[in-house]
């Protein structure tokens, strides 16, 4: 079914006169809602206005220039508008149906094969892709976490493990390999639909270290999507990734660098979550932030211990 030409008004709002019903799915960083809307009882689409003003036009660009070379593992854009005015930007996607976001061994091992696939694409083919995503680069994160060292033991973390993380940070840098990165690969951005993996929200795609996507998948906590990664699953996923990528690497060194990257990123996340907890107006409920903090502390503890075992 084709979309009516006037399904979206000039002000970026859906035309309710043409819509049977609409269902809000989630609220973006700027307060606007992503919605499912129905033209008939069985015909629906996903309406996504610009939810982060800093991402103006980026998702459409990725869908036009990067994703056409991918297999159909992402929802396709049906219609869109790009405007200089943030409120005038919107996209309409095909509706994949009601999505469930499950973090388990089966789904993660299926996803990691695709991560290894797009990480193996020649990076010289993506020189026009942004060099940074939504969050700071790891070099900037490292600079910030250097000031957090004395706070961490008060959160129940072993000082010897934390000292180990900071000692390794001072000894060297992460390898410089760059890959195409999804940029925001948390649980809410992938789902199994009719036994087929679908990966959503590519607007943060950029060039980065391989560890970026791996961390977001395995160890990045999120207020809305609870998950626990245990040591065994983390190692299994890393081993599967190493076996699937098409570039040469020292697998043992790669895993050690991942554990260090994860520990550093988790320290930065802990500071961010604590700041959110102390804010007078919270974006997320206190209970969700406290759970997110505990998940991040667990990931940090496990990865710091893995670094201790690595010598």
Image (cartoon, rainbow, N blue to C red):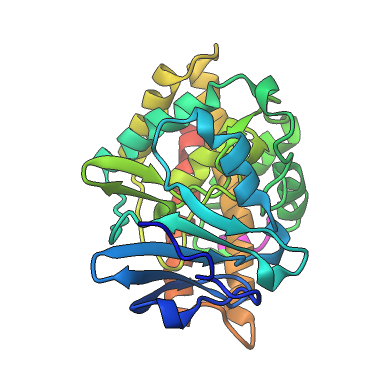
Q: Is residue 214 above or below residue 85?
A: above
160 relative to 244 in the view: left or right: right
Residue located 33% across and 30% down the image: 236
Q: Which residue is painted at 54% across and 14% down in the image?
A: 247
Instruction: Report the front residue among 291 and 281.
Output: 281
The answer to whether residue 78 is above or below residue 89 is above
Q: Nearer the viewer, residue 9 or 220?
A: 9
Quadrant assignment, res 298? bottom left
**With 235 as the anchor, is 160 left or right in this view?**
right
Give the number of marks: 0
Question: Could you tell me what secondary structure mostly forms the magenta stretch?
Answer: loop
- Tell me if residue 20 comes above or below residue 265 in the rendering: below
Instruction: Give the residues in magenta.
Output: 149-153
Measured as percent of width and height from the top left, residue 122 is found at 61, 19
Q: Is residue 162 magenta?
A: no
Answer yes or no: is residue 311 visible.
no
The answer to whether residue 193 is left or right of residue 166 is: left
């Amino acid at each position: 079914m084709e979309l009516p030409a006037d399904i979206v008004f000039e002000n970026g709002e859906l035309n309710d006169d043409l819509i049977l019903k609409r269902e809000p799915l989630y609220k973006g960083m700027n307060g606007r809602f992503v919605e499912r809307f129905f033209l008939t009882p069985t015909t629906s689409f996903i309406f996504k206005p610009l939810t982060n003003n800093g991402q103006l036009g980026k998702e459409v660009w990725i869908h036009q220039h990067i994703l056409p070379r991918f297999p159909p593992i992402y929802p396709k854009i049906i219609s869109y508008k790009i405007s200089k005015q943030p409120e005038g930007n919107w996209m309409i996607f095909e509706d994949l149906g009601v999505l469930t976001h499950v973090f388990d061994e089966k789904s993660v091992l299926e996803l990691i094969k695709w991560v290894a696939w797009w990480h193996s694409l020649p990076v010289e083919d993506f020189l026009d892709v942004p060099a940074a995503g939504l969050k700071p680069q790891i070099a900037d994160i490292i600079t910030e976490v250097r000031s957090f060292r004395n706070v961490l033991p008060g959160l129940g973390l072993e000082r010897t493990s934390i000292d180990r993380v900071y000692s390794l940070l001072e000894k060297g840098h992460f390898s410089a390999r760059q890959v195409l990165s999804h940029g925001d690969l948390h649980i809410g951005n992938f789902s199994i639909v009719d036994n087929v993996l679908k990966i959503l929200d590519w607007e943060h795609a950029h060039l980065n270290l391989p560890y970026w996507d791996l961390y977001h998948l395995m160890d990045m906590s999120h207020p809305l999507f609870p998950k626990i990664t245990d040591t065994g699953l983390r190692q299994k996923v890393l081993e599967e990734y190493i076996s699937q990528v098409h570039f040469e690497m020292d697998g043992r060194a790669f895993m050690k660098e991942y554990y260090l990257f994860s520990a550093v990123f988790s320290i930065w996340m802990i500071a961010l979550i604590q700041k959110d907890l102390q804010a007078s107006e919270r974006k997320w409920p206190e209970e969700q932030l406290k759970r997110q903090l505990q998940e991040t502390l667990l990931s940090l503890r496990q990865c710091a211990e893995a670094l201790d075992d690595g010598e």
